[in-house]
Amino acid sequence: MKCPFCSHLEDKVIDSRLSQDGDVTRRRRECLGCAKRYTTYERVEETLPFVVKKDGTREVFDRMKILSGLKKAFEKRPVSTEAIDGIVDRIEKKFVEAGQKEVPSTAVGEAVMSEIKALDEVAYVRFASVYREFRDISEFMKEMMQLIENKDKQRRGEK
């Protein structure tokens, strides 16, 4: 492991812990060159599907791309980084377990939207405004009205 501070290639592991669900191993390391400590995370490399974009191009499923979008949506919102990481983990797991070699980008986007909506409505609207590419205020208002209607139905106990 290369030290992020001095680029020395040798270190020692001080502590190792499994995440709550056992998918990730967290390791505290100490550089043998500069003696600074840093944390690494290890996960089993799984076969990730290709994401087929709207224009037909394909790219490997990238959890960091999803994480980046989520961080923007949840910026200045009262949502922990652990909750955001959990969303990414669930979405990645969903598509890995599906066993498909390719998934449409719309399926990934809708999965993200569903997770955000359940957690924070303001972040949902932020993400939707970019993801759905609203052309004007009426499209934005239509999405807002659906959100309000769904919330009212939930209050009344409807589905």
Image: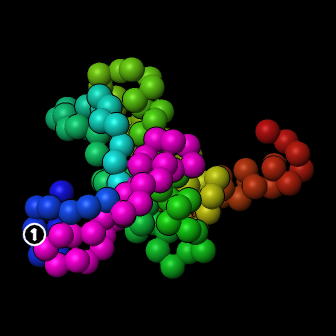
Color theme of the render: rainbow
What x and y, as percent, mark residue 54?
A: 26, 38
Looking at the image, residue 77 sits to the left or right of residue 150; the answer is left
Looking at the image, residue 129 sits to the left or right of residue 12; the answer is right
Relative height, residue 61 to residue 8 (above, below): above
Frontmost residue, 89 versus 25:
25
Start-end of magenta stretch:
14-39
Q: Quadrant of residue 27?
A: bottom left
Location of mark 1 (residue): 7
Residue 61 makes an appearance in the image: yes
Q: Main secondary structure of the magenta part?
A: strand
The answer to whether residue 36 is magenta is yes
* Residue found 89% across the figure and 50% down from its top: 156
The N terminus: image quadrant: bottom left
The C terminus: image quadrant: top right
Look at the numbered disc 1 and give the secondary structure of its residue. Answer: loop
The answer to whether residue 151 is magenta is no
Q: Quadrant of residue 3?
A: bottom left
Mark 1 Cα shell of 10 Å, populated few (<14), some (14-19), many (≥20):
few
